[in-house]
Image (tube, rainbow, N blue to C red):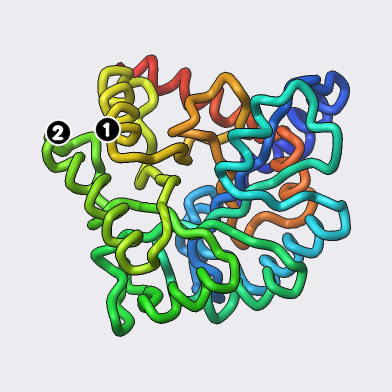
């Protein structure tokens, strides 16, 4: 399937970006969902959310072989405040939705390379026994506790995974605060990071300002969004940019995303959103 964003990235924007590299501190935050061999052939490559285990293994080997430093969201926020990274390029590895295949497929590969990761949980779909979300089995609390003991960080992905923009303030407060409280109660540790579900409504400044205030009031210290790009110090620490990854990301495209060659997609999307508003 012809994929315009990949072609434009590999043959124009990434080469152009390498000719004029930026001195700004930027950190790629990878956004994975399901690690499985699910058939997504009927979905355009850009919108796929599944990554085959073999492809995920290639991604992690690339990070290892190229000496990336895997850090958590809180570390990323601290590093973005530095004038110079002065060492290996940091990267954050995140997963949304709490799928069980993180436990069975992703974690053994991460463990092989000594990498940590952050998993964002929609708590209504995490139970004592496995439940399903969007037709895929989710982690149990027993598995979550086992992963936490092994160094995996957990953050909130709301309670029910709604489109927060369309909820009233009380419902947003419930989704944000209750999910945090549940995870903290189940794990006995602080939850400081939040992941926004669905496309992030960045052009709605009134909503994003209210949401940031709600997150801060609930005790969150940082968060990630679906805004495409690498995180930088100019971005809001509650809505850091991420790079969507799936099975269609071969190593050249994966490298281009890590190195900032995919940021143009956000520029195009933001312009389109402004025109629609």
Residue 164 vs 116, above or below: the answer is above
Q: Which residue appears farthest toward the front when viewing the image? A: 188
| Mark 1, other Cα within 10 Å: few <14 / some 14–19 / many ≥20 | some
Label 1 to label 2: alpha-carbon separation: 9 Å
Q: What element does badge 1 sit on? A: helix
Q: Which residue is mark 1?
A: 214
Q: What element does badge 2 sit on? A: helix
Among numbered discs 1 and 2, the one appearing first in the sequence: 2
Of the 4 image quadrants, the one containing the C terminus is top left
Q: Which mark is residue 183?
A: none
Q: Nearer the viewer, mark 1 or mark 2?
A: 1
Nearer to me, 14 or 193: 193
Residue 49 picture location, percent across and down: 49, 58
1 and 2 marks in contact (CB < 8 Å): yes
Quarter where residue 10 is shown:
top right
Q: Which residue is mark 2?
A: 169
Residue 89 picture location, percent across and down: 79, 41
- Residue at the location (50% across, 78% down)? 146
Q: Is residue 2 visible?
A: no
């Amino acid at each position: 399937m012809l994929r315009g964003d990949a072609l434009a990235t590999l043959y124009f924007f990434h080469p152009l970006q390498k000719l004029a590299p930026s001195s700004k501190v930027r950190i790629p935050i990878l956004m994975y969902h399901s690690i499985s061999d699910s058939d997504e052939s009927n979905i355009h490559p850009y919108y796929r959310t599944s990554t085959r285990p073999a492809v995920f293994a290639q991604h992690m080997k690339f990070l290892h072989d190229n000496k990336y430093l895997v850090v958590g969201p809180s570390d990323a926020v601290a590093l973005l405040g530095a004038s110079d990274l002065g060492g290996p390029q940091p990267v954050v590895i995140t997963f949304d939705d709490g799928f069980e295949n993180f436990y069975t497929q992703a974690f053994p590969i991460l463990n092989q390379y000594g990498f940590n990761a952050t998993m964002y949980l929609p708590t209504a779909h995490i139970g004592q026994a496995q439940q399903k979300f969007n037709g895929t089995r989710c982690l149990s609390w027993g598995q979550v506790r086992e992963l936490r003991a092994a160094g995996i960080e957990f953050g909130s992905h709301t309670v029910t995974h709604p489109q927060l923009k369309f909820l009233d303030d009380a419902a947003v407060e419930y989704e944000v605060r209750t999910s945090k409280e549940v995870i903290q109660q189940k794990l006995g540790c602080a939850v400081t990071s939040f992941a926004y579900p669905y496309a992030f409504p960045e052009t709605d400044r009134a909503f994003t300002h209210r949401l940031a205030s709600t997150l801060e009031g609930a005790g969150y210290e940082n968060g990630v969004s679906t805004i495409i790009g690498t995180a930088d110090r100019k971005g809001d620490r509650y809505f850091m940019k991420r790079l969507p990854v799936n099975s269609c990301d071969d190593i050249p495209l994966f490298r281009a995303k890590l190195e900032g060659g995919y940021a143009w997609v956000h520029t195009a999307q933001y312009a389109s959103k402004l025109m629609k508003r």
